[in-house]
């Protein structure tokens, strides 16, 4: 189980890192993430989702180990020695306890911490100054959406550009400014100005009733400051202790979802005992595929329950009942396999109800044998 768990963790982290890297690079190309902070965002993302990867790795390790025991006929020896399938529960739980503790710590503390830092990086990049947004050869919108900048090519001197174009929307007036050259000047007050040279400006109203054209040899335009205020934090970025002290539909749903990751990992161990049953003539990958689909279904139901609680249409504690119901079903399923229970024969009961003497005679014959 240790070797299987370690190999599964390495493989899943490699796959997830590749997928997250492609997604993060896509966000950077769209301007949602700073390209120089891609590796930092990727590290925080992996850390936040590590609890989910550990739960899946633990489930795959349990199913893979039990499947190998079935496939190599070791389970036949185990059962013939008077041990049942439920006897595997104690060593498996002993092996999984450190991982369960790690999953609980990651889901309760690392998940909000990593999401908070990712959100700070995204907000800082989105709320950067207008001059920092300008990229040579691309039309770039300002933070408040009132200006559009374009620079044809960058100069060899930092802070200077050629063939500058600025389109501004202020009330019912629109302004278009073009210049051959432009550079940045920092004032003593800390404000930044874009100084344009040798250009012209066109100002007109939306109803085209007025039109003004002017030429200039030097023109200064103040660039708006970036907004340092950050919007309302999302529940996934809040500390677990804060969610507990400030109960609401969204906060409680987020807290139960974090706790539910640990319950999910524990339930999957019980499910793996009840699920692991291999046909030696079947394929070796069938149990692992079944385990993967089981985890996907369980995790999707967990997210559906979280969204249902956050919407306020139902109780945010409904997912705790869901985990309890899954544990009950998995325990009954395991007990049936451990005790070799069989579903009652409906036909025999119907015959016995019509003619009870037939059942008595059959039982007496079995007793003599």
Image: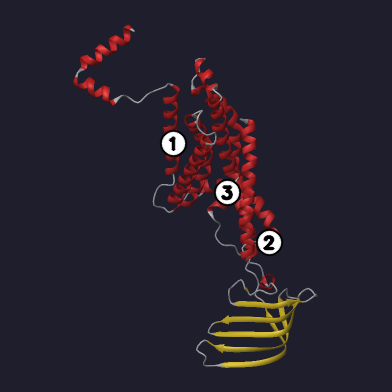
Q: Position of residue 228 (x, y in %)?
A: 63, 65
Front position in the image: 244 or 225: 225
Describe the element under mark 2 as helix, strand or loop. Answer: helix
What element does badge 1 sit on? helix
| Outermost front residue | 281
Mark 2, residue position: 35
Q: Where is residue 80 in the image (x, y as percent from the top left)?
A: 50, 16
Pick the quarter of the image with the N terminus. top right
Q: Is residue 165 above or below residue 121?
A: below
| Camera-side residue of 348 and 254 | 348
Q: Please state the horizontal and vertical placement of residue 187, each as a whole percent of the image.
A: 75, 77
Image position of 37 with respect to 56: above or below: below
- Which quadrant of the rendered structure holds the C terminus? top left
Residue at numbered disc 3 = 239
| Mark 1 → mark 3, Cα distance in angstroms | 28 Å
Q: Are marks 1 and 3 in contact (CB under 8 Å)?
A: no
């Amino acid at each position: 189980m240790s070797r299987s768990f370690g190999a599964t963790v390495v493989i899943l982290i490699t796959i997830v890192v590749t997928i997250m890297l492609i997604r993060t690079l896509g966000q950077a190309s769209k301007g949602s993430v700073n390209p120089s902070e891609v590796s930092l965002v990727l590290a925080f993302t992996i850390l936040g989702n590590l609890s989910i990867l550990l739960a899946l790795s633990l489930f795959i390790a349990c199913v893979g180990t039990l499947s190998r025991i079935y496939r190599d006929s070791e389970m036949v020896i185990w059962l013939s020695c008077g041990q049942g399938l439920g006897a595997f529960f104690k060593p498996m739980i002993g092996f999984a306890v450190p991982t369960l503790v790690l999953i609980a710590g990651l889901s309760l503390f690392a998940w909000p911490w990593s999401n908070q830092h990712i959100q700070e990086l995204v907000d800082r990049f989105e709320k950067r100054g207008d001059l920092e947004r300008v990229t040579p050869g691309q039309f770039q919108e300002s933070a408040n959406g009132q200006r559009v900048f374009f620079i044809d090519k960058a100069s060899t001197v930092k802070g200077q550009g050629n063939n500058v174009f600025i389109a501004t929307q202020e009330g019912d007036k629109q302004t278009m400014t073009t210049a051959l050259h432009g550079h940045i000047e920092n004032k003593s007050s800390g404000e930044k100005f874009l100084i344009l040279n040798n250009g012209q400006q066109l100002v007109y109203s939306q109803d085209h009733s007025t039109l003004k054209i002017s030429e200039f040899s030097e023109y200064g335009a103040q660039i708006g400051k970036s907004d340092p205020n950050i919007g309302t934090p999302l529940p996934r970025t809040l500390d677990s202790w804060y969610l507990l002290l400030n109960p609401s539909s969204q906060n409680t749903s987020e807290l139960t979802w974090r706790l539910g990751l640990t319950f999910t990992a524990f339930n999957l161990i019980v499910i793996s005992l009840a699920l692991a049953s291999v046909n030696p003539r079947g394929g070796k990958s069938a149990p692992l595929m079944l385990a993967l689909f089981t985890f996907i279904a369980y995790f999707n139901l967990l997210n559906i329950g979280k969204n249902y609680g956050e919407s306020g249409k139902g109780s945010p504690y409904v997912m705790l009942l869901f985990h309890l119901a899954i544990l009950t079903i998995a325990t009954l399923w395991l007990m049936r396999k451990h005790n070799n229970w069989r579903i009652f024969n409906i036909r025999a009961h119907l015959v016995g109800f019509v003619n009870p003497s037939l059942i008595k005679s059959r039982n007496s014959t079995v007793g003599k044998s």
